């Protein structure tokens, strides 16, 4: 089996405006109206698959894609603690090129798949560190001591190689098990625009991700579910100076079918109340994901749905 396609996408950014005023006086501090911009980007994909037997296949694919910058990235700055990130109306679209080889198959009650891949992301939109407080900077204003100023920029390229795998199995007892993993070795080449990033790992990108889940139909009415997710160490910032600890989270749910279209459930998100670190500012302020949450609810389904 061979399948492919190509397309030409157009993008446009226009009528953007950023206005900042002094809250006390109402005086306009900034009135920025960047020029309108547009462009076209060709993309394509080619994939092949061959069945080696009734239970094993091999496949390969190569592809190109793109992502235009969002309105937030173009026009909206943000601040977390004393860390300020400026928008950039001159951002260009990101462009992705990649290839992958994989194999997979089926066995009694289940299946498996394994894929190796290479990706290159040109002009990735990156929060690039451009200054440290204390100091006053154009557009951003005053950054206090311990603070950091970043700006969204198209910073060189990112190369990533890795492997992904998954396996699933259904048992006659009503138990379904699944597991998946991903390993990604990603590295930034900042080029002439951001040489300080060369050799660094992209922010918020773990090397290892592991997920697993189980669904058990205990009786005709009672169902139990559990899901696990693990992420290895990540870096919060572009310079790889702030480490985010590895994280393991577990969710669980019990549901009781009242009728063919209604069921009650009780669920626990982050069952073991793990501290999942999601961010850290230059002055040591840490952010965490939601703590353990218990939910009780009613699910309604349309007949035949």
Image: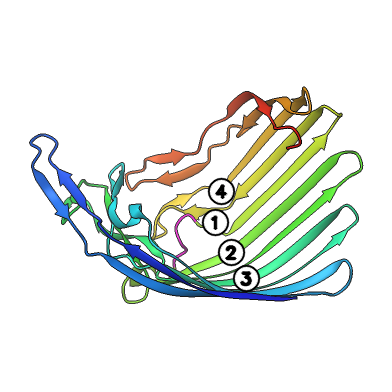
Q: Residue at x 67, y 43 (%)?
A: 228
Q: Position of residue 148 (x, y in %)?
A: 28, 52
Residue on which the image places disc 2 = 184
- Mark 1 or mark 4, which has the lower sequence index? 1
Q: Residues within 10 Å of mark 1 (few under 14, many from 20)?
A: many
CA separation in Å, label 2 and label 1: 8 Å
CA separation in Å, label 3 and label 4: 24 Å
**Is residue 2 found left or right of 93 in the rendered image?**
right
- Mark 3 or mark 1, which has the lower sequence index? 3
Residue on which the image places disc 1 = 206
The answer to whether the residues at label 2 and label 1 have Cβ atoms under 8 Å apart is: yes
CA separation in Å, label 4 and label 2: 15 Å
Instruction: Please report the bounds of the magenta region as a residue range.
Output: 200-204
Q: What element does badge 3 sit on?
A: strand
Q: Residue at x 85, y 31 (%)?
A: 218
Q: Please tell me the numbered disc located at residue 246.
A: 4
Mark closer to the observer (2, 3): 3
The answer to whether the residues at label 1 and label 4 have Cβ atoms under 8 Å apart is: yes
Colour scheme employed for the rendering of this structure: rainbow
CA separation in Å, label 3 and label 1: 16 Å
CA separation in Å, label 2 and label 3: 9 Å
Q: Residues within 10 Å of mark 3 (few under 14, many from 20)?
A: some
Please tell me in which quadrant of the rendered image residue 219 appears. top right
Q: Please tell me the numbered disc located at residue 48.
A: none
């Amino acid at each position: 089996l061979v399948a492919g396609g190509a397309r030409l996408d157009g993008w446009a950014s226009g009528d953007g405006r950023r206005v900042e005023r002094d809250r006390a006086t109402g005086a306009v501090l900034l009135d920025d109206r960047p020029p309108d911009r547009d462009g076209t980007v060709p993309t394509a994909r080619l994939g092949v698959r061959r069945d080696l037997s009734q239970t094993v296949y091999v496949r390969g694919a190569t592809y190109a894609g793109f992502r235009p910058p969002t309105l937030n990235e173009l026009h909206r700055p943000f601040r977390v603690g004393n860390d300020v990130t400026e928008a950039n109306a001159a951002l260009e679209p990101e462009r992705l090129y990649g290839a992958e080889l994989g194999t997979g198959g089926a066995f009694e009650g289940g299946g498996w798949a394994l894929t190796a891949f290479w990706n290159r992301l040109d002009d990735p939109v990156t929060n690039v560190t451009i200054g440290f407080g204390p100091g006053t900077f154009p557009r951003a204003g005053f950054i206090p001591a311990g603070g950091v100023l970043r700006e969204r920029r198209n910073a060189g390229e990112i190369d990533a190689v890795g492997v992904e795998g998954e396996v699933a199995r259904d048992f006659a007892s009503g138990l379904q098990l699944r597991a998946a993993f991903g390993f990604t070795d990603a590295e930034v080449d900042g080029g002439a625009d951001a040489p300080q990033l060369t050799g660094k790992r992209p922010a918020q990108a773990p090397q290892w991700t592991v997920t697993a889940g189980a669904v058990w139909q205990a009786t005709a009415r009672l169902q139990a579910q559990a899901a696990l997710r693990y992420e290895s160490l990540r870096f919060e910032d572009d310079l790889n100076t702030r480490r985010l600890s590895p994280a393991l989270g577990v969710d669980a749910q019990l549901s009781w079918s009242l009728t063919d279209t209604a069921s009650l459930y009780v669920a626990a998100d982050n069952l073991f109340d793990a501290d999942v670190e999601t961010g850290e500012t230059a002055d040591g302020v840490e952010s965490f994901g939601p703590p353990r949450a218990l939910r009780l609810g009613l699910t309604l389904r349309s007949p035949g749905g």
